[in-house]
Image (spheres, rainbow, N blue to C red):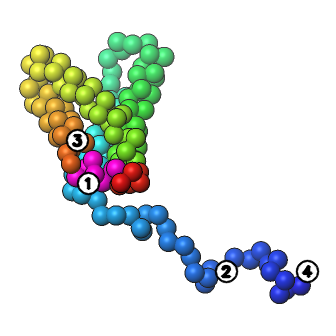
Amino acid sequence: MASGSGDDLTPDFNAPQPPRRFSQARPRPIAVWLLFLILFIQGVAVLVSTVSAALVSEAEVLDTVGRVMLVLLYLGIGVLLIILGFRLFLGHSGARTPTVLAQFMIVVLSFSFFSGGALQVGLLFLLPAAVALVLAFIRPTQQWLDQADGST
């Protein structure tokens, strides 16, 4: 192999690099930032509460398999909320529908706390979910997500 034949496989780190997608991102509206933060905090809260409850819980209502499955379900939901937040933050409009579905489920869950007399816990579930639902459908969020898909 000749050194000048173009068959050299060593990368040239000084050569001009194409711009990265994240550095080319359009400015996000404040609604997208807030929606991302709400989903991220909800996901982290689910993960932390699940792990702490699994570690300190002494009540044996379920057998071991049921308890493991419930912990895995909660961990999956927490991770899903975080992933949905990042997907919306990156501009994937397809993440809006599962986000709205998850927030509606959280709203329904909040009413069970209200009927049980835990007003503060119900509000802690209801208010962020309601704000996230509104933020998912306001015009700046819709326009930004539509532009990210290239449909404008």
Image quadrant occupied by the N terminus: bottom right
Q: Give the crowd class for mark 1: few <14, some 14-19, many >=20 residues within 10 Å.
A: some
Who is closer to the viewer here, 84 or 96? Answer: 96
Examine the rendering and report whether any part of residue 78 can be seen. no
The magenta segment is 140-146
Q: Which residue is mark 4?
A: 1
Q: Which residue is mark 1?
A: 33
Label whose residue precedes the other's in the sequence (4 or 1)? 4
Q: Is residue 127 above or below residue 14?
A: above
Distance Cα–Cα, label 2 vs label 1: 37 Å
| Drawn side of residue 107 relative to residue 96, left or right | left
Q: Which residue is mark 3?
A: 137
Distance Cα–Cα, label 3 vs label 2: 46 Å
The type of residue carrying mark 1 is Trp
Q: Nearer the viewer, mark 3 or mark 2?
A: 3
Distance Cα–Cα, label 2 vs label 4: 18 Å
| Label 1 SS | helix
The type of residue carrying mark 3 is Phe
